[in-house]
Image: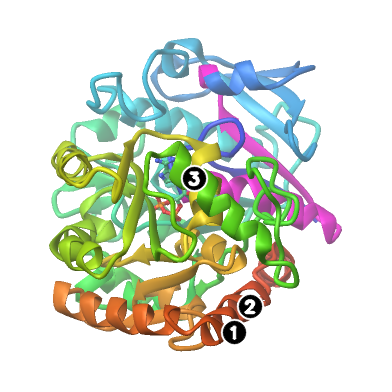
Amino acid sequence: MRILFATSEARPLIKTGGLADVSGALPAALRKIGLDCRLLLPGYPAVLAGIDNAEPVCNLSGLPGGITATLLQAPMPDNGVPLYILVAPELFQREGGPYQDVAGHDHPDNALRFAVFSKAAAILASDGDSPLAWRPQLLHCNDWQTGLAPAYLRLAGQTTPSLMTVHNLAYQGIFPPADLATVELPPESFSMEGVEYYGNLSFLKAGLYYADRLTTVSPTYAEEIRQPALGMGMQGLLAARGDDLVGILNGIDSGEWNPSSDRHLPCKFSARALAGKKQCKLKLQQDLNLEPGKETPLFGIIARLAQQKGLDLILAIADGILHRGGQIALLGTGEKMLEAAFRELGASHPGRVAAVIGYDEGLSHRIEAASDLFLMPSRFEPCGLNQLYSLSYGTVPIVHATGGLRDTVEDGVTGFVFHEPTPHALWLAVERALRAHADPKMWQRMMRAGMKRDFSWEKSAREYESLYRGLVA
Ligand code: ADP
Protein backbone atom coordinates (compact mmCIF):
# COMPACT_ATOMS: atom_id res chain seq x y z
CA MET A 1 0.00 0.00 0.00
CA ARG A 2 1.31 3.43 -0.99
CA ILE A 3 0.90 6.27 1.51
CA LEU A 4 2.03 9.88 1.14
CA PHE A 5 2.67 11.31 4.62
CA ALA A 6 2.54 15.10 4.35
CA THR A 7 3.99 16.96 7.32
CA SER A 8 5.69 20.28 7.96
CA GLU A 9 8.18 18.82 10.48
CA ALA A 10 10.15 15.59 10.79
CA ARG A 11 13.10 14.94 12.99
CA PRO A 12 16.06 14.91 12.64
CA LEU A 13 15.66 17.52 9.89
CA ILE A 14 13.26 20.06 11.35
CA LYS A 15 11.47 20.10 14.69
CA THR A 16 9.45 22.46 16.83
CA GLY A 17 7.47 19.84 18.78
CA GLY A 18 6.05 16.36 19.01
CA LEU A 19 4.81 16.37 15.39
CA ALA A 20 8.44 16.08 14.30
CA ASP A 21 9.05 13.04 16.51
CA VAL A 22 5.96 11.31 15.12
CA SER A 23 6.80 12.14 11.49
CA GLY A 24 10.37 11.00 12.03
CA ALA A 25 9.31 7.60 13.36
CA LEU A 26 5.85 6.53 12.16
CA PRO A 27 6.65 6.34 8.41
CA ALA A 28 9.64 4.10 9.20
CA ALA A 29 7.47 1.89 11.43
CA LEU A 30 4.91 1.64 8.61
CA ARG A 31 7.59 0.64 6.13
CA LYS A 32 8.81 -2.00 8.56
CA ILE A 33 5.42 -3.69 8.45
CA GLY A 34 5.41 -3.62 4.65
CA LEU A 35 3.74 -0.35 3.61
CA ASP A 36 5.31 1.98 1.06
CA CYS A 37 5.05 5.16 3.10
CA ARG A 38 6.87 8.27 1.85
CA LEU A 39 7.28 11.69 3.39
CA LEU A 40 6.59 15.12 1.94
CA LEU A 41 8.27 18.11 3.66
CA PRO A 42 8.68 21.79 2.76
CA GLY A 43 12.18 22.72 1.60
CA TYR A 44 13.23 24.72 4.66
CA PRO A 45 16.95 25.57 4.82
CA ALA A 46 17.46 23.01 7.63
CA VAL A 47 15.84 20.30 5.52
CA LEU A 48 17.97 21.06 2.46
CA ALA A 49 21.11 21.25 4.60
CA GLY A 50 20.33 17.98 6.34
CA ILE A 51 20.02 15.66 3.35
CA ASP A 52 22.48 14.04 0.98
CA ASN A 53 22.07 12.77 -2.55
CA ALA A 54 18.92 14.75 -3.33
CA GLU A 55 17.69 14.35 -6.87
CA PRO A 56 15.19 16.55 -8.68
CA VAL A 57 12.22 14.45 -9.73
CA CYS A 58 9.75 16.89 -11.27
CA ASN A 59 8.40 20.42 -11.31
CA LEU A 60 5.03 21.29 -9.90
CA SER A 61 2.74 23.98 -11.24
CA GLY A 62 -0.91 24.77 -10.68
CA LEU A 63 -0.04 25.94 -7.16
CA PRO A 64 -1.66 28.98 -5.47
CA GLY A 65 -0.14 32.40 -6.21
CA GLY A 66 1.27 31.19 -9.52
CA ILE A 67 4.14 29.58 -7.60
CA THR A 68 6.15 26.91 -9.35
CA ALA A 69 8.10 24.45 -7.26
CA THR A 70 10.59 21.69 -7.73
CA LEU A 71 10.27 18.33 -6.08
CA LEU A 72 13.46 16.72 -4.81
CA GLN A 73 13.76 13.16 -3.61
CA ALA A 74 16.26 11.95 -1.01
CA PRO A 75 16.38 9.34 1.73
CA MET A 76 15.68 10.50 5.29
CA PRO A 77 19.04 10.73 7.07
CA ASP A 78 18.34 8.35 9.99
CA ASN A 79 16.14 5.67 8.56
CA GLY A 80 16.22 5.96 4.77
CA VAL A 81 12.46 6.59 4.40
CA PRO A 82 11.92 8.07 0.91
CA LEU A 83 11.44 11.80 1.28
CA TYR A 84 10.02 14.30 -1.20
CA ILE A 85 10.97 17.91 -0.59
CA LEU A 86 8.93 20.78 -1.97
CA VAL A 87 11.44 23.41 -3.02
CA ALA A 88 9.95 26.89 -3.43
CA PRO A 89 12.71 29.26 -2.29
CA GLU A 90 10.51 32.37 -2.06
CA LEU A 91 8.27 30.56 0.44
CA PHE A 92 10.46 28.25 2.46
CA GLN A 93 14.09 29.33 2.24
CA ARG A 94 14.31 32.15 4.74
CA GLU A 95 15.64 32.93 8.19
CA GLY A 96 13.74 32.04 11.34
CA GLY A 97 11.70 28.96 12.14
CA PRO A 98 9.19 27.10 10.00
CA TYR A 99 6.32 29.36 11.07
CA GLN A 100 7.90 32.44 12.60
CA ASP A 101 10.66 34.92 11.85
CA VAL A 102 13.71 35.45 14.05
CA ALA A 103 11.79 37.92 16.22
CA GLY A 104 9.06 35.35 16.90
CA HIS A 105 6.37 36.88 14.66
CA ASP A 106 4.39 34.64 12.30
CA HIS A 107 5.65 34.83 8.72
CA PRO A 108 3.15 37.20 7.06
CA ASP A 109 2.55 34.85 4.11
CA ASN A 110 1.88 31.66 6.10
CA ALA A 111 -1.50 31.26 4.38
CA LEU A 112 0.15 31.14 0.96
CA ARG A 113 3.11 29.04 2.17
CA PHE A 114 0.99 26.24 3.59
CA ALA A 115 -1.67 26.50 0.89
CA VAL A 116 1.10 25.79 -1.62
CA PHE A 117 2.37 22.91 0.51
CA SER A 118 -1.15 21.47 0.89
CA LYS A 119 -1.90 21.88 -2.81
CA ALA A 120 1.34 20.13 -3.73
CA ALA A 121 0.34 17.20 -1.49
CA ALA A 122 -3.09 17.10 -3.14
CA ILE A 123 -1.60 17.17 -6.65
CA LEU A 124 0.79 14.32 -5.84
CA ALA A 125 -2.19 12.31 -4.57
CA SER A 126 -4.40 13.10 -7.57
CA ASP A 127 -5.32 10.87 -10.44
CA GLY A 128 -4.18 12.40 -13.68
CA ASP A 129 -2.64 15.63 -12.35
CA SER A 130 0.52 14.33 -10.72
CA PRO A 131 3.81 14.60 -12.62
CA LEU A 132 5.23 11.91 -10.32
CA ALA A 133 5.30 8.29 -11.47
CA TRP A 134 4.77 7.08 -7.88
CA ARG A 135 1.09 7.49 -7.05
CA PRO A 136 -0.10 7.21 -3.42
CA GLN A 137 -3.32 5.36 -2.68
CA LEU A 138 -3.92 7.51 0.38
CA LEU A 139 -2.86 10.95 1.60
CA HIS A 140 -2.06 11.18 5.31
CA CYS A 141 -2.18 14.84 6.45
CA ASN A 142 -0.89 16.19 9.73
CA ASP A 143 -2.07 19.33 11.54
CA TRP A 144 -3.18 22.64 10.08
CA GLN A 145 -0.19 23.08 7.78
CA THR A 146 -1.59 20.31 5.56
CA GLY A 147 -5.26 20.94 6.38
CA LEU A 148 -6.18 22.37 2.98
CA ALA A 149 -5.00 19.26 1.11
CA PRO A 150 -8.20 17.24 1.74
CA ALA A 151 -10.22 20.30 0.64
CA TYR A 152 -8.26 20.65 -2.62
CA LEU A 153 -8.68 16.93 -3.31
CA ARG A 154 -12.39 16.84 -2.62
CA LEU A 155 -13.24 20.11 -4.36
CA ALA A 156 -11.39 18.93 -7.48
CA GLY A 157 -13.55 15.79 -7.51
CA GLN A 158 -10.61 13.53 -6.70
CA THR A 159 -11.34 10.20 -5.07
CA THR A 160 -8.00 9.45 -3.40
CA PRO A 161 -8.90 9.05 0.30
CA SER A 162 -7.33 11.34 2.87
CA LEU A 163 -6.71 10.99 6.57
CA MET A 164 -6.21 13.98 8.85
CA THR A 165 -4.29 13.55 12.09
CA VAL A 166 -4.63 16.20 14.78
CA HIS A 167 -1.47 16.44 16.88
CA ASN A 168 -2.74 19.49 18.74
CA LEU A 169 -6.15 21.06 18.21
CA ALA A 170 -4.95 24.36 19.68
CA TYR A 171 -3.07 25.23 16.47
CA GLN A 172 -5.71 25.85 13.86
CA GLY A 173 -4.14 27.85 11.04
CA ILE A 174 -6.59 30.76 11.21
CA PHE A 175 -6.44 33.51 8.58
CA PRO A 176 -8.70 36.41 7.61
CA PRO A 177 -11.49 35.69 5.09
CA ALA A 178 -9.61 37.64 2.41
CA ASP A 179 -7.06 34.80 2.32
CA LEU A 180 -9.67 32.56 0.71
CA ALA A 181 -8.55 34.19 -2.54
CA THR A 182 -4.86 33.73 -1.63
CA VAL A 183 -5.33 29.99 -1.18
CA GLU A 184 -7.50 29.81 -4.30
CA LEU A 185 -10.48 28.01 -2.84
CA PRO A 186 -13.94 28.66 -4.31
CA PRO A 187 -16.15 31.20 -2.48
CA GLU A 188 -18.81 28.55 -1.76
CA SER A 189 -16.31 26.62 0.40
CA PHE A 190 -16.36 29.54 2.85
CA SER A 191 -19.27 28.27 4.93
CA MET A 192 -19.99 26.24 8.05
CA GLU A 193 -20.06 23.26 5.70
CA GLY A 194 -16.52 24.00 4.59
CA VAL A 195 -13.47 25.98 5.61
CA GLU A 196 -15.14 28.83 7.51
CA TYR A 197 -14.54 29.02 11.25
CA TYR A 198 -16.24 31.81 13.22
CA GLY A 199 -15.92 34.23 10.33
CA ASN A 200 -12.33 33.32 9.44
CA LEU A 201 -10.62 30.74 7.29
CA SER A 202 -9.20 27.80 9.25
CA PHE A 203 -6.82 25.34 7.60
CA LEU A 204 -7.42 22.81 10.36
CA LYS A 205 -11.17 23.06 10.05
CA ALA A 206 -10.77 22.42 6.31
CA GLY A 207 -8.93 19.19 7.06
CA LEU A 208 -11.43 18.16 9.72
CA TYR A 209 -14.32 18.81 7.38
CA TYR A 210 -13.04 17.36 4.10
CA ALA A 211 -10.77 14.46 5.13
CA ASP A 212 -12.32 11.01 4.91
CA ARG A 213 -11.17 9.95 8.36
CA LEU A 214 -9.77 11.76 11.38
CA THR A 215 -7.35 10.59 13.99
CA THR A 216 -5.73 12.13 16.98
CA VAL A 217 -2.87 10.91 19.09
CA SER A 218 -4.53 9.30 22.10
CA PRO A 219 -7.91 7.70 22.81
CA THR A 220 -8.67 10.08 25.69
CA TYR A 221 -7.89 13.19 23.61
CA ALA A 222 -10.17 11.81 20.87
CA GLU A 223 -13.00 11.88 23.45
CA GLU A 224 -12.01 15.20 25.02
CA ILE A 225 -12.02 17.18 21.76
CA ARG A 226 -15.69 16.35 21.19
CA GLN A 227 -16.52 18.38 24.32
CA PRO A 228 -16.58 22.18 24.75
CA ALA A 229 -13.81 22.25 27.39
CA LEU A 230 -11.07 21.03 25.03
CA GLY A 231 -12.83 21.16 21.66
CA MET A 232 -11.44 24.65 20.95
CA GLY A 233 -14.58 25.55 19.02
CA MET A 234 -14.33 22.45 16.79
CA GLN A 235 -16.34 20.22 19.17
CA GLY A 236 -19.54 20.47 17.12
CA LEU A 237 -17.88 19.28 13.94
CA LEU A 238 -15.87 16.61 15.77
CA ALA A 239 -18.94 15.30 17.58
CA ALA A 240 -20.86 15.24 14.30
CA ARG A 241 -18.07 13.23 12.69
CA GLY A 242 -18.16 10.90 15.72
CA ASP A 243 -17.56 7.58 13.99
CA ASP A 244 -14.85 8.99 11.72
CA LEU A 245 -12.58 10.05 14.60
CA VAL A 246 -10.32 7.67 16.50
CA GLY A 247 -7.36 8.07 18.86
CA ILE A 248 -4.15 6.16 18.14
CA LEU A 249 -1.46 6.54 20.75
CA ASN A 250 1.98 7.71 19.65
CA GLY A 251 4.94 5.44 20.20
CA ILE A 252 8.52 6.29 20.98
CA ASP A 253 11.47 5.91 18.69
CA SER A 254 13.46 3.28 20.54
CA GLY A 255 16.49 3.91 18.32
CA GLU A 256 16.62 7.45 19.73
CA TRP A 257 15.18 6.97 23.20
CA ASN A 258 16.66 3.91 24.83
CA PRO A 259 18.72 4.28 28.04
CA SER A 260 20.83 1.23 27.24
CA SER A 261 22.12 2.69 23.95
CA ASP A 262 21.49 6.45 24.14
CA ARG A 263 24.50 8.20 22.60
CA HIS A 264 23.80 11.40 24.56
CA LEU A 265 24.30 9.77 27.98
CA PRO A 266 27.54 9.60 29.96
CA CYS A 267 26.46 6.16 31.33
CA LYS A 268 23.97 3.67 29.98
CA PHE A 269 21.45 1.74 32.07
CA SER A 270 18.47 -0.56 31.83
CA ALA A 271 15.69 -2.00 34.02
CA ARG A 272 18.06 -4.81 35.00
CA ALA A 273 21.13 -2.65 35.57
CA LEU A 274 20.04 0.65 37.07
CA ALA A 275 23.39 1.83 38.48
CA GLY A 276 24.23 3.98 35.46
CA LYS A 277 21.21 6.16 36.14
CA LYS A 278 22.77 7.47 39.38
CA GLN A 279 25.96 8.26 37.48
CA CYS A 280 23.93 10.20 34.91
CA LYS A 281 22.43 12.15 37.80
CA LEU A 282 25.77 13.03 39.41
CA LYS A 283 27.13 14.13 36.04
CA LEU A 284 24.10 16.30 35.29
CA GLN A 285 24.25 17.89 38.75
CA GLN A 286 27.87 18.74 38.04
CA ASP A 287 27.15 20.06 34.53
CA LEU A 288 24.23 22.23 35.67
CA ASN A 289 25.89 23.46 38.90
CA LEU A 290 23.45 21.64 41.12
CA GLU A 291 24.66 20.42 44.52
CA PRO A 292 25.86 16.83 44.15
CA GLY A 293 23.64 14.26 45.85
CA LYS A 294 22.73 10.75 44.74
CA GLU A 295 19.68 10.58 46.96
CA THR A 296 18.38 14.13 46.38
CA PRO A 297 15.05 13.85 44.56
CA LEU A 298 15.69 15.51 41.20
CA PHE A 299 12.62 16.79 39.32
CA GLY A 300 13.03 17.12 35.54
CA ILE A 301 10.96 19.37 33.28
CA ILE A 302 11.35 19.59 29.50
CA ALA A 303 8.72 21.54 27.64
CA ARG A 304 7.72 24.26 25.28
CA LEU A 305 7.12 27.05 27.75
CA ALA A 306 3.48 27.56 26.85
CA GLN A 307 0.29 28.04 28.83
CA GLN A 308 -0.80 24.53 27.74
CA LYS A 309 1.97 22.88 29.74
CA GLY A 310 0.74 24.07 33.16
CA LEU A 311 4.15 25.42 34.14
CA ASP A 312 2.54 28.10 36.31
CA LEU A 313 1.40 25.24 38.57
CA ILE A 314 5.03 24.20 38.97
CA LEU A 315 6.10 27.75 39.74
CA ALA A 316 3.40 27.88 42.41
CA ILE A 317 4.75 24.83 44.25
CA ALA A 318 8.48 25.15 43.49
CA ASP A 319 9.27 26.48 46.97
CA GLY A 320 7.55 23.47 48.48
CA ILE A 321 9.65 21.08 46.39
CA LEU A 322 12.87 22.85 47.40
CA HIS A 323 11.76 23.00 51.03
CA ARG A 324 11.42 19.20 50.97
CA GLY A 325 14.99 18.89 49.76
CA GLY A 326 14.21 18.47 46.05
CA GLN A 327 16.11 19.87 43.09
CA ILE A 328 14.68 21.08 39.78
CA ALA A 329 16.26 20.84 36.32
CA LEU A 330 14.25 22.60 33.63
CA LEU A 331 14.90 22.83 29.89
CA GLY A 332 12.59 24.88 27.71
CA THR A 333 11.95 27.88 25.51
CA GLY A 334 8.82 29.74 24.65
CA GLU A 335 6.73 32.48 26.23
CA LYS A 336 8.94 35.26 27.52
CA MET A 337 7.09 35.58 30.85
CA LEU A 338 7.60 31.91 31.65
CA GLU A 339 11.23 32.06 30.53
CA ALA A 340 11.79 35.01 32.87
CA ALA A 341 9.98 33.31 35.77
CA PHE A 342 12.10 30.16 35.53
CA ARG A 343 15.31 32.17 35.06
CA GLU A 344 14.39 34.04 38.23
CA LEU A 345 13.65 30.80 40.09
CA GLY A 346 17.08 29.49 39.07
CA ALA A 347 18.86 32.72 40.02
CA SER A 348 17.30 32.80 43.46
CA HIS A 349 18.09 29.14 44.25
CA PRO A 350 21.63 28.46 43.02
CA GLY A 351 22.62 24.85 43.44
CA ARG A 352 18.97 23.80 43.81
CA VAL A 353 17.32 24.91 40.58
CA ALA A 354 18.87 24.81 37.10
CA ALA A 355 16.78 26.57 34.46
CA VAL A 356 18.22 26.19 30.99
CA ILE A 357 16.35 28.43 28.57
CA GLY A 358 17.05 27.06 25.13
CA TYR A 359 16.54 24.11 22.83
CA ASP A 360 19.04 21.29 23.31
CA GLU A 361 18.30 17.76 22.20
CA GLY A 362 21.29 16.17 23.97
CA LEU A 363 20.48 17.89 27.25
CA SER A 364 16.85 16.75 26.98
CA HIS A 365 18.11 13.14 26.94
CA ARG A 366 20.47 13.77 29.86
CA ILE A 367 17.72 15.35 31.97
CA GLU A 368 15.39 12.41 31.24
CA ALA A 369 18.12 9.97 32.26
CA ALA A 370 19.27 11.84 35.37
CA SER A 371 15.96 12.81 36.94
CA ASP A 372 14.11 10.76 39.54
CA LEU A 373 10.79 12.40 38.79
CA PHE A 374 9.34 14.21 35.80
CA LEU A 375 6.75 16.98 36.09
CA MET A 376 4.13 17.21 33.36
CA PRO A 377 1.09 19.08 34.69
CA SER A 378 -0.25 19.97 31.22
CA ARG A 379 -3.72 21.54 31.17
CA PHE A 380 -4.33 19.43 28.07
CA GLU A 381 -2.00 17.05 26.28
CA PRO A 382 -2.97 15.35 23.01
CA CYS A 383 -0.48 12.54 23.62
CA GLY A 384 2.70 13.87 25.17
CA LEU A 385 6.05 12.28 24.54
CA ASN A 386 8.14 13.26 27.52
CA GLN A 387 6.10 11.13 29.94
CA LEU A 388 6.80 8.17 27.61
CA TYR A 389 10.51 8.96 27.51
CA SER A 390 10.41 9.31 31.31
CA LEU A 391 8.76 5.92 31.75
CA SER A 392 11.34 4.19 29.64
CA TYR A 393 14.20 5.98 31.46
CA GLY A 394 13.00 5.00 34.94
CA THR A 395 12.01 8.58 35.66
CA VAL A 396 8.69 8.49 37.44
CA PRO A 397 6.24 10.96 35.86
CA ILE A 398 3.80 13.15 37.78
CA VAL A 399 1.03 14.06 35.34
CA HIS A 400 -2.37 15.70 35.10
CA ALA A 401 -5.09 13.23 34.09
CA THR A 402 -5.66 14.54 30.58
CA GLY A 403 -5.32 13.22 27.03
CA GLY A 404 -2.40 10.90 26.42
CA LEU A 405 -1.03 11.47 29.94
CA ARG A 406 -4.11 9.72 31.30
CA ASP A 407 -3.75 6.90 28.77
CA THR A 408 -0.09 6.15 29.48
CA VAL A 409 0.64 6.74 33.17
CA GLU A 410 -0.86 4.40 35.75
CA ASP A 411 -1.33 6.06 39.11
CA GLY A 412 0.67 4.46 41.90
CA VAL A 413 2.10 1.83 39.53
CA THR A 414 4.21 3.67 36.95
CA GLY A 415 3.67 7.27 38.06
CA PHE A 416 1.45 9.74 39.89
CA VAL A 417 -1.72 11.15 38.38
CA PHE A 418 -3.71 14.11 39.68
CA HIS A 419 -7.12 15.21 38.52
CA GLU A 420 -7.53 18.96 38.89
CA PRO A 421 -5.05 21.33 37.19
CA THR A 422 -4.44 23.28 40.40
CA PRO A 423 -1.27 23.88 42.44
CA HIS A 424 -2.88 22.09 45.39
CA ALA A 425 -3.66 18.91 43.44
CA LEU A 426 -0.18 18.92 41.91
CA TRP A 427 1.33 19.40 45.35
CA LEU A 428 -0.57 16.43 46.80
CA ALA A 429 0.77 14.28 43.94
CA VAL A 430 4.31 15.55 44.56
CA GLU A 431 3.97 14.70 48.25
CA ARG A 432 2.83 11.18 47.41
CA ALA A 433 5.75 10.84 45.02
CA LEU A 434 8.26 12.05 47.61
CA ARG A 435 6.94 9.55 50.16
CA ALA A 436 7.35 6.76 47.62
CA HIS A 437 10.82 7.99 46.67
CA ALA A 438 11.88 7.74 50.30
CA ASP A 439 11.23 3.97 50.16
CA PRO A 440 13.96 2.60 47.85
CA LYS A 441 12.30 -0.79 47.32
CA MET A 442 8.99 0.70 46.34
CA TRP A 443 10.72 3.27 44.16
CA GLN A 444 12.70 0.70 42.21
CA ARG A 445 9.50 -1.28 41.69
CA MET A 446 7.85 1.80 40.16
CA MET A 447 10.86 2.62 38.01
CA ARG A 448 10.98 -0.90 36.63
CA ALA A 449 7.23 -1.05 36.07
CA GLY A 450 7.49 2.02 33.81
CA MET A 451 10.60 0.78 32.05
CA LYS A 452 8.87 -2.46 31.14
CA ARG A 453 5.89 -0.83 29.45
CA ASP A 454 5.92 -1.21 25.69
CA PHE A 455 5.48 2.06 23.81
CA SER A 456 7.06 0.92 20.58
CA TRP A 457 5.74 2.31 17.31
CA GLU A 458 4.91 -1.08 15.91
CA LYS A 459 1.57 -1.38 17.72
CA SER A 460 0.47 2.09 16.59
CA ALA A 461 1.69 1.45 13.04
CA ARG A 462 -0.57 -1.62 12.88
CA GLU A 463 -3.54 0.50 13.96
CA TYR A 464 -2.82 3.06 11.23
CA GLU A 465 -2.44 0.24 8.74
CA SER A 466 -5.87 -1.15 9.51
CA LEU A 467 -7.37 2.32 9.18
CA TYR A 468 -5.61 2.85 5.82
CA ARG A 469 -6.85 -0.52 4.58
CA GLY A 470 -10.43 0.35 5.47
CA LEU A 471 -10.14 3.62 3.51
CA VAL A 472 -8.35 2.26 0.46
CA ALA A 473 -10.78 -0.64 0.16
P1 ADP B 1 4.54 19.35 22.15
O1 ADP B 1 4.48 18.72 20.80
O2 ADP B 1 3.25 19.90 22.65
O3 ADP B 1 5.65 20.34 22.28
P2 ADP B 1 5.31 16.69 23.12
O4 ADP B 1 5.53 16.18 24.50
O5 ADP B 1 4.37 15.91 22.26
O6 ADP B 1 4.87 18.21 23.25
O7 ADP B 1 6.70 16.74 22.35
C1 ADP B 1 7.71 17.64 22.66
C2 ADP B 1 9.01 17.16 22.08
O8 ADP B 1 9.91 18.27 22.01
C3 ADP B 1 9.69 16.12 22.94
O9 ADP B 1 10.48 15.30 22.12
C4 ADP B 1 10.57 17.01 23.84
O10 ADP B 1 11.65 16.28 24.38
C5 ADP B 1 11.03 18.04 22.88
N1 ADP B 1 11.40 19.34 23.49
C6 ADP B 1 10.57 20.30 23.94
N2 ADP B 1 11.27 21.36 24.38
C7 ADP B 1 12.58 21.07 24.19
C8 ADP B 1 13.81 21.78 24.44
N3 ADP B 1 13.82 23.00 24.97
N4 ADP B 1 14.97 21.17 24.11
C9 ADP B 1 14.96 19.92 23.57
N5 ADP B 1 13.84 19.22 23.32
C10 ADP B 1 12.66 19.78 23.62
Residue 451 occupies quadrant: bottom right
Q: Residue at x 44, y 78 (%)?
A: 437
Instruction: Give, as a three-letter code, the residue at label 3.
Output: Leu
Query: In the rendered image, which residue does mark 1 sit on?
Result: 445
> Marks 1 and 3, Cα distance to the nearest angstrom?
24 Å
Front one among 161 and 427: 427
Instruction: Give, as a three-letter code, the residue at label 1.
Output: Arg
**From where the camera sits, is residue 237 visible?**
yes
Question: Left or right: 93 with respect to 21?
Answer: left
Is 27 covered by the magenta stretch?
yes
Query: In the rendered image, which residue does mark 2 sit on?
Result: 448
Helix, strand or loop status at disc 1:
helix
87 vs 385: above or below: above
Spot occupied by residue 105 in the image (x, y as percentages of width and height): 22, 26
Residue 341 occupies quadrant: top left
| Upstream in sequence: badge 1 or badge 3 | 3
Spot occupied by residue 234 in the image (x, y as percentages of width and height): 27, 65
Query: In the rendered image, which residue does mark 3 sit on?
Result: 284
Q: Residue at x 83, y 61 (%)?
A: 33
Which span is picked out in magenta?
A: 18-45
> Marks 1 and 2, Cα distance to the nearest angstrom?
5 Å
Residue 381 occupies quadrant: bottom left
Front one among 143 and 212: 143
Spot occupied by residue 307 in the image (x, y as percentages of width and height): 20, 54
Q: Residue at x 47, y 14 (%)?
A: 93
Helix, strand or loop status at disc 3:
helix
Number of other residues with Cα within 10 Å of mark 1, as a class: few under 14, some 14 to 19, many 20 or more: some
